Image (tube, rainbow, N blue to C red):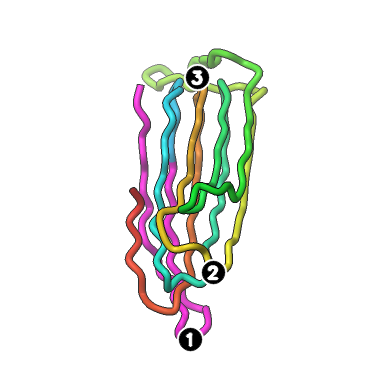
Amino acid sequence: MGITLLFSFLGINSGIAQGDHKYDVQKQIKLNNESEMQEIILPVKDSVNSLTILVQSNIQVGDLTLEILDPKGDKHGYFSIGSQLSTPIKNKSKYQGKSGYYSNPDKANGSLSRTINKPQEGDWKIKILPKDATGTINIDFAQKSLAPVFIILK
């Protein structure tokens, strides 16, 4: 019972004001009957002009609460979602040799989008609080900065 992290790392986009730099990082988290709290940490430097965080989640089983916290611990958004099912439904594949998959017509979807102008310098956190949750969470971070910044999610 572990969390799988997939990274699509660091894209520099053109088409923004000259002198500005934009950095995007995407992270996907797959939950498989998870109940352990997780934190994603995004270091923000003082040269960052704006920070955008977009979260999209799809929970097939269980409950999920997600919070965005600044370096001082103040909330900048949260949501809670839950599925009506407590266990996944397993569908068998029609084709021999193909694996089955989980589906649930009562799945829950949640999303949250925040743009913070002149964000506080320090470690911003996405706190993930699942309860027997199965599903996926997609998190996109975008930072605009006057100077080039190297981003590493912790």
Q: Is residue 6 magenta?
A: yes
Q: Quadrant of residue 152?
A: bottom left
Q: Nearer the viewer, residue 123 or 50?
A: 123
For the residue labelled by badge 1, is the local secondary structure a helix, a strand or a loop? Answer: loop
- CA distance for labels 1 and 3: 47 Å
Q: Are marks 1 and 3 in contact (CB under 8 Å)?
A: no
The earlier-in-sequence mark between 1 and 3 is 1
The earlier-in-sequence mark between 3 and 2 is 2
Three-letter residue code for mark 2: Lys
Residue 53, which numbered label? none
- CA distance for labels 2 and 1: 18 Å
- Magenta-tinted stretch: 1-28
What residue did someone put label 2 on? Answer: 118
What residue did someone put label 3 on? Answer: 132
Query: What crowding class fits label 1: few (fewer than 14 Cα within 10 Å), some (14-19), or many (20 or more)?
Result: few
Q: Position of residue 43 (x, y in %)?
A: 38, 57
* Residue 146 drawn above or below residue 25: below
* Residue 150 drawn above or below residue 63: below
Looking at the image, residue 46 sits to the left or right of residue 63; the answer is: left
The earlier-in-sequence mark between 2 and 1 is 1
Three-letter residue code for mark 1: Gln
What residue did someone put label 1 on? Answer: 18
Q: Which quadrant does the N terminus fall into?
A: top left
Q: Nearer the viewer, residue 102 or 112?
A: 112
Query: What crowding class fits label 2: few (fewer than 14 Cα within 10 Å), some (14-19), or many (20 or more)?
Result: some
Q: Is residue 18 magenta?
A: yes
Residue for point 45% across, 29% down: 31
Q: Position of residue 113 (x, y in %)?
A: 62, 52
Q: Position of residue 108 (x, y in %)?
A: 64, 30
For the residue labelled by badge 3, is the local secondary structure a helix, a strand or a loop? Answer: strand
Front tag of 2 and 1: 2
